[in-house]
Image (cartoon, grey):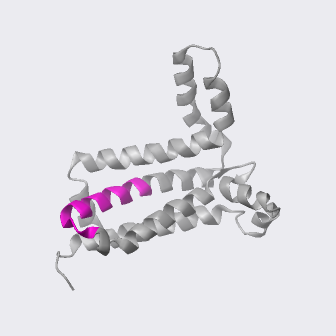
Amino acid sequence: MLLSAFFTVYRKPCSWFITISTAWIFLTTVLWYQNWSLIVYIMGGASQWWLKVSFLLSMYSSLQSSITFTNMLTTVSISVLLGVQLSFVITYIRRAQTGWQVLHRAHAASVAGMVAGLFGVGCAACGSVIVSGLLSFIGANGLLLLLPWHGQEFGLLGIGLLLWSIYFVARKLQSPLVCK
């Protein structure tokens, strides 16, 4: 069923474009968020524009050096799954044209997966960026150390929610468009 839905969605080049661009935008947002102050400093400098572009492109190499392999795998997985989810939802909405009521649970799971995935993104030194920031704001940053994987659970939760959401939309893509 999932394979049939995959072929239904990705027979059009537009779906490939949506998936790749969404994954790239999400991954870029995560990478740039972790290095925002450095980016602002470099972009504000008086160097030539091609050096600035070169610097921004070199940020992708920091993915393997600034975070652990598990965090890198989680971040890339969430990026790709988010792109796949968006392609599936767009295909279903185009097919149904009234899919907003039917896909309410899938939208909620997709948004929840993305938010949980964002909570799980972090670097090797500081752990989960958003969760540690929120916890340190209330003085409870050490609570992440009590978790077995020190905050990586949020990224795995995001992957799980996105997989469930993709499965839910794939099941809806394969079912006939009739009222129950």
| Quadrant of the drawing holding the N terminus | bottom left
Outermost residue toward the bottom? 180
- Which residue is located at x 81 percent, y 64 percent? 140
The answer to whether 110 is drawn above or below residue 17 in the figure is: below
Image check: 102 left or right of 43?
Answer: left
Which of these two is toward me, 3 or 18? 18
- Which residue is located at x 25 percent, y 59 percent? 91
Rendering quarter of residue 149: bottom right
- Which residue is located at x 44 percent, y 65 percent? 110
Residue 66 % position (x, y): 67, 42
**In the rendered structure, does residue 63 fall within the stretch colored magenta?**
no
Which of these two is toward me, 121 or 33? 33
Main structural element of the magenta stretch: helix, strand or loop? Answer: helix
Residue 33 % position (x, y): 61, 43
- Which residue is located at x 43 percent, y 57 percent? 81
Which of these two is toward me, 42 or 168? 42
Residue 101 % position (x, y): 31, 74
Range drawn in magenta: 81-99
